[in-house]
Image: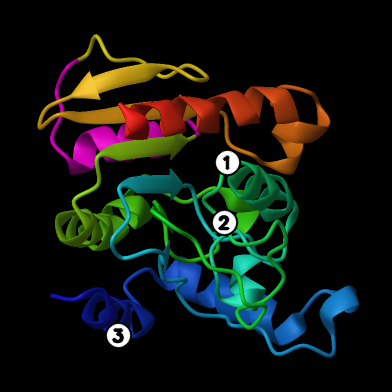
Amino acid sequence: MTLDEINTELLACRLCPRLVAWREKVAREKRRAYQGQEYWGKPVPGFGDPQARVFVVGLAPGAHGSNRTGRQFTGDASGDFLYPALFRAGFASQPNSNSREDGLTLTNLYTAPVCRCAPPDNKPAPEEMKNCQPYLEREIEIIQPKIFVALGRIAFESIMRTISIQNKALSFAHNAVHEIPGGRWLVCSYHPSRQNTQTGRLTTEMFDEVWKTVRKLLED
């Protein structure tokens, strides 16, 4: 399958009743600040360079972020932290990500979530993540990245499961780097959620170090 074919199938998916009901409810009722906007309210496709050597995995769309804009990490606090870092590292054409029409492009980097629909309380259920796993598997098969970046422990576990790594010695820690089969690498980072960035668990300097690590792996 091509990425376009995967996304066509994804946009028609209604496999998880709880997520379908929530994403569509949020899209109808809207947040007051976005009352004049049309919400996406559907599964959110991956985004980025189809020839990427770096594959970034997040958790799930935000109810009033990606579920509103229809693009990964766009229109919420996580994206406001992520894209400036990608811009500084040379992966993004601009530091801002506001809408699908803002002209942002990614170079050598592709991003997709573990769960494609916005979940209540930002907490997808294990079965819901399992239902989404085939999309991630097929994207990885098409893109064949050299480096995976896991944004958060759930993303780390999903990558390990998706590419069938059973090595229990590999563990999640911020800026941890693991060599994995096939001459590939897995880099870990705390998720750029508002909770992590506002509490100082993840600082700008800490996040920049992750992307410096990724750049060095690419150059080596």
Q: Amino acid at mark 1?
A: Ala
Residue picked out by circle 3: 8
x, y percentage for residue 203? 74, 26
Tell me what residue is drawn at x 53 percent, y 33 percent: 211
Residue 166 seen in the figure:
yes
Q: Are marks 2 and 1 in contact (CB under 8 Å)?
A: yes
Q: Residue furthest top?
A: 169
Identify the residue under disc 2: 92
Question: Which tag, 2 or 3, sits closer to the chain's start?
Answer: 3
Give x and y (percent) for residue 109: 41, 53
Local SS, label 3: helix
Q: CA distance from mark 2 to mark 1?
A: 8 Å
Q: Is residue 213 above or below residue 112?
A: above
Mark number displayed over residue 89: 1
Answer yes or no: do the residues labelled 2 and 3 have beta carbons within 8 Å?
no
Residue 15, picture quadrant: bottom left
CA neighbours of label 2 inside 10 A, class few (<14), some (14 to 19), many (20+): many
Circle 3 packing at 10 Å, graded few (<14), some (14-19), many (20+), is few
- Which colour style is shown? rainbow
Q: Which residues fall within the magenta stretch?
A: 152-167
